[in-house]
Image: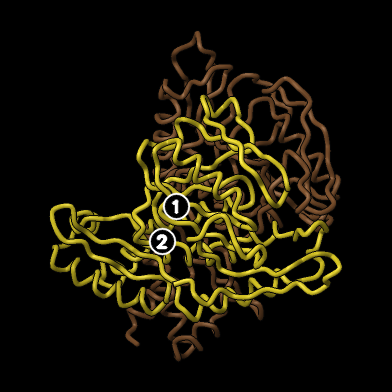
Chain colours: A yellow, B brown
Amino acid sequence: MKRMERVAALINILTEHPTQVYTLQYFCDLFGAAKSSISEDIQAANNSIKISGFGFLETIAGAKGGVRFIPDISEENIKILQKEFCERLSEPSRMVGGNFLYTSDIFYDPSIVRRIALIFAKKFRKCEANYVATIETKGIPLAFMVSHYLNLPLVVVRRDAKISEGSTISINYFSGSNDRLQKMSMSKRAIEPNSKVLIIDDFMRGGGSIVGMSEMIKEFNGKVVGIGVAIASIEPEKKKVDDYTSVVFLGDISLENKNIVLKSNENIF
Amino acid sequence: MKRMERVAALINILTEHPTQVYTLQYFCDLFGAAKSSISEDIQAANNSIKISGFGFLETIAGAKGGVRFIPDISEENIKILQKEFCERLSEPSRMVGGNFLYTSDIFYDPSIVRRIALIFAKKFRKCEANYVATIETKGIPLAFMVSHYLNLPLVVVRRDAKISEGSTISINYFSGSNDRLQKMSMSKRAIEPNSKVLIIDDFMRGGGSIVGMSEMIKEFNGKVVGIGVAIASIEPEKKKVDDYTSVVFLGDISLENKNIVLKSNENIF
């Protein structure tokens, strides 16, 4: 096997499985090569990955050591994503009345979802979460891509308890967006007690459903270690949660106001 | 820039954006290299990608031509995935009563979802779909990964019409699993008229919800060009749809029957 083929195959394996640690021995066996050669290959692979701008390799020392691919997104590409995201969100045809925007096409579009997910994967890389959690429905692809990049299981909180979820814990919470009491439920099998959870969602107005999810996680003796929302509304300025990260901010979208205002968050990191 | 770095960066860019066509000129500009060099790099990249087993490069001739990464999964890896999938599904603790299994952890686990998605991406590579569609909730990550691999937008059919979906079309259908009439709705903005749609879902028993989705797609003058379900139940043998592909088959799971029977589908292709 030629050197170049080995390096490229190594890149392919690592980038297909973000954040997952592979031992040097794994590659020695796979390629029939010595550890010293594999070490050099990893160095070459890292240089190449850095050029493409999608991440970098991290080597972990010690008995459980190895190498893994950490996905990344450059500041420049974050700005490009934010600009594109704002432009798409500000299309007037998205207004559906009642202070709501049609955003499903964007949150189900792999080309934009994977870049927003990269931002959150970068932001919450070191938060040591055991799970990524979201509430159905529109944030699921985004949360799933974050869980893919961080190599974590995803948990989806449901609006209604389903029989296929087994025993569930349900809580009621107040949603400002809908101006009413809502219910959410989560399977008792969904997370281990005392887990650390990263919450990812598509949209936050007052923060009611995020507070609801935090309450839910507390029911499992879990801890919220990060909150990422793709869009946060500018109003109300005072949210029910303080420590969250949004990619963009959305202004008033009442129908009288034909102009949808969007701003990039300049302080993600 | 060294040859190896160029090849590796090329692999990285192409594999991060499955099925998306890049012109040779794009790489010439990016790397400051001649077309003849880039052509050689693509050849080398293709050899390396094939070795890692995750896909291959396809070159497209003509003015709109270029190169793209086609994700793939080997027969051997399909068998490994099927075996693992069957083993996890047959854990007795999954039985939640009423002929239902708890499967959320599996369908929200990136390591298994991406491999099932690769099988469907391979199966339906040439079906010329314009959209991947699913019905909320558990199949969303799987359908989204298929849409990522095929570079297509995803459409999610909702159980209830939501205000943020704008005008919707709703239909009623009979669900055998729940033994009752159910409703599904889809935003009028979700798909263009006369589109070809690939349906992906986590589970099929009688096929009621798949028939419902097909009816829905007909309301948009669309056409179903493929149906992929991760799990199909063995009973009832006669489904409401004929032409579907499942990864595994699931036997009777009534609580009296402590043994959950699973079989790999040997005829996916």
Looking at this rendering, what residue extends furthest in the top direction? B256
Q: Nearer the viewer, residue A224 or B82?
A: A224
Tag 1: amino acid: Leu
Q: State which tag comes first along the sequence, 2 or 1.
A: 2
Tag 2: amino acid: Phe
Left or right side of B68 for A47? left
Taking the spot 49% from the left edge, 75% from the top edge, the residue there is A267
User: Which disc is residue A124 wearing?
Assistant: 2
Q: Vertically, is A144 above or below A156?
A: below
The percent position of residue A20, horizontal first and vertical second, equals 32, 55
Q: What element does badge 2 sit on? A: loop
- Is circle 2 on the same chain as circle 1? yes
**Which quadrant: the C terminus of chain B?**
top right
Q: Nearer the viewer, residue B98 or B122?
A: B98
**Which quadrant: the N terminus of chain B?**
bottom left
Q: Vertically, is A2 above or below B90?
A: below
The percent position of residue A45, horizontal first and vertical second, equals 30, 72
Taking the spot 52% from the left edge, 25% from the top edge, the residue there is A166
Viewer can see residue B228: no
Q: How many marks?
A: 2
Q: Are the residues flagged by discs 2 and 1 in contact, CB closer than 8 Å?
A: yes
Chain identity of mark 2:
A
Q: What element does badge 1 sit on? A: strand
Chain identity of mark 1:
A
Taking the spot 47% from the left edge, 20% from the top edge, the residue there is B261
The percent position of residue A84, horizontal first and vertical second, equals 64, 75
The percent position of residue A168, horizontal first and vertical second, equals 52, 28
Q: Which residue is mark 1?
A: A198
Q: Vertically, is A2 above or below A144?
A: below
